[in-house]
Image (cartoon, rainbow, N blue to C red):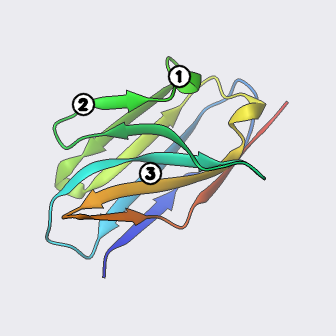
Amino acid sequence: QVQLVESGGGLVQAGGSLRLSCAASGTRLNTYVMGWYRQAPEKQRDLVATITRGGATNYANSVKGRFTISRDNAKDTVYLQMNSLKPEDTAVYYCYAVIGIRDYWGQGTQVTVSS
């Protein structure tokens, strides 16, 4: 059974930093795209950043220059380094992965940025 296990969320003051991690387990298939989406209260789930197995990245305009996505293919783990956090970054952050031909989602981790 494939699982995406997230860690690293929490409460931080504006201007601070957090690092999210997400590890995929339960599969022998390659993880192709991995990434992060976020959902604020009463809003839709939006892309934050993705990274391919080869290292190509894609970022939402709102986080460019502040967030950095990376991955460790040997560990099937993706990371999101979030710097210069703003109150508007407050949301539940969901890990995402394409494994084989299917999409998978983590259970989400709360990130709260206080002003």
**From the viewer's perspective, is 46 left or right of 71?**
right
The type of residue carrying mark 3 is: Ser
Judge whether 63 appears above or below 22 on screen. Answer: above
Residue at the spot of label 1: 61
Q: Residue at x 61, y 32 (%)?
A: 17
Q: Quadrant of the C terminus?
A: top right
> Regarding mark 3 in the picture, which secondary structure is present there?
strand
Q: Residue at x 28, y 57 (%)?
A: 98
Residue at the spot of label 3: 21
Judge whether 71 appears above or below 87 on screen. Answer: below
> Regarding mark 1 in the picture, which secondary structure is present there?
helix
Q: Earlier in the sequence, mark 2 or mark 1?
A: 2
The location of residue 50, given as percent across then percent down, is 37, 39
Residue at the right extreme of this rendering: 115
| Corner quadrant of residue 58 | top left
Count the labels in the image.
3
Q: Residue at x 60, y 58 (%)?
A: 109
3D distance between C-alphas at marks 2 and 1: 16 Å
3D distance between C-alphas at marks 3 and 2: 18 Å
The type of residue carrying mark 2 is: Ala
> Regarding mark 2 in the picture, which secondary structure is present there?
loop
Residue at the spot of label 2: 56
